[in-house]
Amino acid sequence: MFFFPETDYSAYPKNFIRFLGTAGTRFIMLSQRRASGGIWFSYGGCHGVIDPGPGSLVQICAADPPLSPLDINAIILTHRHIDHCSDVNVLTEGMTLKSPDKKGEILMTDDCTEAGDTVLLGYYAKKLSRLHRHRDGARCELPGCLTVESVVHEHHRVECFGLIFRSDGLPTWGIVSDTAALAEFPSRYSECDILVMNVTMLHPRSRLDHLSLSDAESLLQFLHPRLALVTHMSGFLLDYGPKKIESRLSTKRTKTITATDGLVVDLDGV
Ligand SMILES: [Zn+2]
Ligand SMILES: [Zn+2]
């Protein structure tokens, strides 16, 4: 007989994110120097996972306090690179397992389901209650009481979008995913009280569409979120050290934390 214990979320804050990984670059992912499972969020009545890369399911099942893949209501892929999408099918298995009817929603880019090169198997796509597509500036309603706005990015010729989460009465928070630094980010992310940034490089390199530490520094000079969280780091950045990253990016108005695997952030406590 099927048995899966009920998960008690009372050990977590009501609205929170948990880093299931903080790896950036294929080298950090392949060595698992940092885990690469993306971000769990519980916000506005929705449990979801953003960018479930390699080991996302393992990180969920190993989490303490526990999380359960069966409790996921939504999965969001910012883009189709393997460090952001490899576990989408196994998490969809968990998300849809308990329901005889269609269940669960996914927000992804059009090129995630390109004919002949889809990241989501047809078997799982058929089990979903809704499959949403990113459209720049559109606000997608997910199960619970929240919307997610897609923010177009520029990232090595794949479709890629950042995210802004809103729910009435709750802090607004956002993610700048893998991208070159774009001039419109200060206006697009201006409402975010909390901002997660995929900061991959120590120094800017024109051929690489990833944020560098100085790009993040410039962005925060415009945005002033109450909390900035740095993730998706390369080996160069990890070697540079979390304390130095935090002292460069923190200001009188913004506290910066370099995320670690398993870090839980109380979204209401910022
Ligand atoms: Zn990428
Ligand atoms: Zn990436």
Image: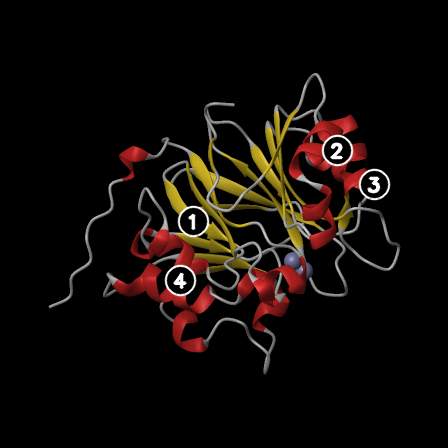
Q: Are marks 1 and 4 in contact (CB under 8 Å)?
A: no
Of helix, strand and loop, which one carries label 1?
A: strand
- Which amino acid type corresponds to the residue marked 2 in the rendered image? Ser
Inter-mark Cα distance, 3 to 4 = 35 Å
Few, some or many C-alpha atoms within 10 Å of disc 4 (few <14, some 14-19, many ≥20)?
many
Q: Nearer the viewer, residue 58 or 113?
A: 58
Few, some or many C-alpha atoms within 10 Å of disc 2 (few <14, some 14-19, many ≥20)?
few
Q: Nearer the viewer, residue 38 or 126?
A: 38
Tell me where residue 254 sits by quadrant.
top right
Q: Which mark is residue 219?
A: none
Residue drawn 63% across the image and 50% down it: 232
Q: Which mark is residue 91?
A: 4
Q: Position of residue 47 (x, y in %)?
A: 38, 46
Residue drawn 66% across the image and 45% down it: 137
- Image quadrant containing the N terminus: bottom left
Q: Are marks 3 and 2 in contact (CB under 8 Å)?
A: no
Q: Are marks 2 and 1 in contact (CB under 8 Å)?
A: no
As drawn, 241 above or below 81: above
Q: Is mark 2 within 8 Å of ligand 1?
A: no
Q: Residue furthest right?
A: 206
Few, some or many C-alpha atoms within 10 Å of disc 1 (few <14, some 14-19, many ≥20)?
many
Of helix, strand and loop, which one carries label 4?
A: helix
Q: Which mark is residue 48?
A: 1
Give the residue at mark 3: 183
Inter-mark Cα distance, 1 to 4 = 10 Å
| Residue 182 horizontal side relative to residue 23, left or right | right
Query: Which is nearer the N-term, disc 2 or disc 1?
Result: 1
Q: Position of residue 101 (x, y in %)?
A: 26, 64
Tell me where residue 11 sits by quadrant.
top left
Give the residue at mark 2: 187
Q: Nearer the viewer, residue 242 or 190?
A: 242
Count how many numbered circles sit on residues in the image.
Answer: 4
